[in-house]
Amino acid sequence: MALSPYLTPKPTQTIPCIHTLSIAQQNTRKSLTATKELLRHLENTNIDIVLIQEPHTQNTHQILGFPTNSLIHQANCLDLPKTGIYIRNKNLYTQTIHSFTSTWMTSIQVQLETTSLILATIYIEPNKITSQHIDTIKNLLQTYERHPIILSGDLNARHTLWYDRIVNKHGELFCELVNEQALHIHNNKNPTCITLNGTSIIDLTLTNIHATPHISYWKSALIDGMFDHKLLEFKFSAAEKIPTKTWTSTKKFNEKKANWATFRKHIRTQSLRDIEHNIEHAICAEVIDTQLERLTKMIQKAAYKSMPTIKRPTYQRRSIWWDDELKCMQIVVKNMRNRFSHEHDPEVRQYFYEDFKASRNRFIRMIRAKKFRKWKEFLEEIHSRDTWGNTYRMIKHKLNPKQYSLPILEDHPPQSHQHILKNIVDQIFPSREFSHHRIHTNTSSDTSLLYPLITKDYIELLISKSNSKKAPGLDHITYGMLKPVRDKISKILASLFNKCLEIGYFPRQWKEGTLTIFPKPNKDDYYNPKNYRPITLLSSIGKLFEKIIQSRIQNFLTENNSLNSSQHGFVPNKSTTTALFNIKKEILDHKIDSLVSLIAIDFSGAFDNADWDIILKNMTSLQIPYYLVRIIDSYFQNRIVSMRFNNNQYSKTMTQGCPQGSPLSPLLWNILLNSLLDSFSFGNATIHAYADDITIICHGKDITTLHRLAQEILTFVNIWSKHNNLTINAQKTQILNFHTHAFPRPIMLGSSTIQIVRQLKILGLTFENHKLKRKLNFTPHVNSIVNRTIKIKNILHCFCKNTLGVDTRKRQNLYKGLIRPVMTYGSEIWADQINKKQFSKLESLQHQILRNSIMAFRTVSKPCVTSLTKVETSRPT
């Protein structure tokens, strides 16, 4: 295991653990059907780890046939893998040992309490053994000589030492290895491989002196008649605890199985009235916190009474295609296999073998037919009219496979997790001194009593429009729970929110968020917290209140034109399209008679480093009503972020940052950034913002003037950033020139040189210079669209064939909702800048997809397809 970059403190909490591992070994002979049958057999067992030889790969460099999101260790190379290790118990801490993993051997370590168990699965082809094989195994044994080691695999080695009838070259070399390294052989006299030519013991389980005492219940068994190799099973009983992961989630209840009548029954009207009465007569924050806690507990109790909690199974059990007919057929095939394997007469044995082979083939065909039928039912969902069902989810998964692992935690010993959690939270949310007494206003102008009251009907509307799939906060209450009782709780929530606005208090319970991190795609170092995207999960009821505050502040800013018009992010009637249109227009307007450059500025951790004092100061400068400034002040005070992993937790009081996941965060960032946009006053430059994405267009008559202007702009923005406690990321800040002249000197940001690039992606649109003065080059963007659309089209065709898949209506809806937005994003910007050939590419792709949607032949013309699908052409009119 890679050494942790973190110190390993003493554990402060109990680490969840088990004491025994169940391990299996199987050669699947490269067969998909055999792989599926192995998985079906495993459903009835508690096998934790499966060591695989000759896995099914379909001539690719990936092991195939296992469930989606399965954890499989294998060699990361372009050659066909011949071994792999399937971690069926996802709660184990495992890691690939890359230095001892290749096409023919896969090695992993399983974390124990104070050491690691080393597991290696090996496959050596018949008559292909070399000294390299033996030397590699020796190196593994010597490198981890102080650890328990288990070697298991199809070695094609035969020797009388392990009760085989004959001795071959493989057997001689492994016999020497066993004697030299003092390995123990766990095989008994039962053969592990049965073929027409006889039986043999070529699948071995070997252990060193540290593992041998802990191996028990070793056995070999034939799963069914499809395998030549028997399944080997054994248990490893560790002398110490085997730490395991525990599933932590704020989503606690299975709402799909909820009894909503029971849920409503436990939201008692009289209790709600008592809480409402206490809130309306509250004069201090403590009363609000107490009554909110009563309301929360009532909803939680109703949930416990009316719906089951979500339980994450340790093992996957999903072979819905397996039925009694297959079970009976399996018994027949297995009996026929036993009949031919026990027959000694060669002629009768051959006859029995042919009979067995025909029966086995019928069994395989039946498995394939039943699997295909279930797969077809799964995709087509003929009893549902929902377009966004199983087919859509499968396509989305193929396009964007989610990475559920967290190497920054999972690749390190459990004892170090507490320290790593602290390091993650501290790096994502650095501390800064924060004062609580900064609001200075004339009390005579206090308009807190003049604000419009929140009504019951407005709360009901807000709840009904909320997304039920959003993850809840620490209280486990989702929008899906609030919707069935919105008529009951809307009045008490209106009273609660109005009282909070009246006294200027944001309840303590809503200030604690749960930090969840997701790996950013295409990063090299996943041990760096900066390569994870942080999301803070907050209370659903608290977010309703945040939405009300956000709406009121936004409405005030819009009505008074307080926000700078250069801000396009999270502003009514503006979007990425309006920002891109302004950027394009500015470039083309000045490209005709000037030299133009585009500067894209990136702030490091913009939202997470937003200064609260400056936000409140800017709110006062914008003359936002005092009662809203006061509630934001309370919103900032004593905020806590907590991160959990297994039984470890680290909490920190925040002193800066807008939590990503909060409805208020984008607006608060806009208020912070507004002073930059207002103070930007360069005559030959314009600034454009979409949230924290800053784009500056500058132009000059000659290259010297342009260079000086670009340097002054960067210096100005850098000074503003320092005054507002933000940092510009010099590595991600780039310049795109719309001319062919070279700057006389590098453009600097402090001591860093700003990179000049040939093309640059701005808000999802790739810009590049064009040789013509009145044009921009969007060829890279169109090529990107074509490549992505082809990828989606190919995946779509896998699930929607002429003989399989959803109906025509759903296919066309998938095109309109999944593919068309990709093809047309930003088309208002680039459509008049590309040529006929590029349009033809896009039109041809659309034709192929729509032709598939009506299950037509290739010869059907474009006008015919357009007429039948009623989807307009992508070519501009």
Image: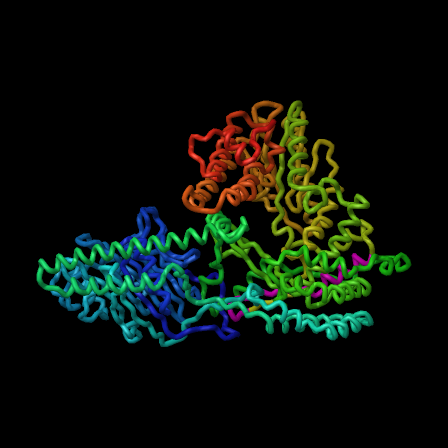
The number of numbered discs placed on residues in the rendered structure image is 0
Counting from the top left corner in percent of width and height, residue 270 is at 74, 75
Residue 667 colored magenta? no
Q: Nearer the viewer, residue 860 or 340?
A: 860
Viewer-side residue, 151 vs 765: 765
Asked whether residue 102 appears in the rendered view, the answer is no
| Residue 865 place in picture, x, y as percent | 50, 33
Rendered position, 462 above or below 768: below
Q: Residue at x 44, y 53 (%)?
A: 377
Look at the image and tell me whether residue 378 can be seen: yes
Q: Position of residue 740 (x, y in %)?
A: 57, 26
Which part of the image, by quadrant, shows the C terminus?
top right
Quadrant in the picture for residue 169: bottom left
Task: Assess whether residue 635 is covered by the magenta stretch.
Answer: yes
Say left or right for 90 vs 254: left
Colouring mode (rainbow / by chain / secondary structure / one colour): rainbow
From this view, report whether residue 724 is shown above or below residue 514: above
Residue 436 point in image, percent of width and height: 76, 63
Which residue shows up at 82% across the image and 63% down it? 502
* Front-most of residues 828 and 660: 828
Side (left or right) of 877 relative to 112: right
Question: Quadrant of the rendered structure where residue 444 is?
Answer: bottom right
Please state if 250 lies on the left or on the right of 314 as rendered: right
440 and 198: which is toward the camera: 198
Q: Quadrant of the N terminus?
A: bottom left
**Above or below 555: residue 714:** above
Q: Check the image and report above or below for 572 versus 238.
A: above
**Residue numbers of the magenta segment:** 626-648
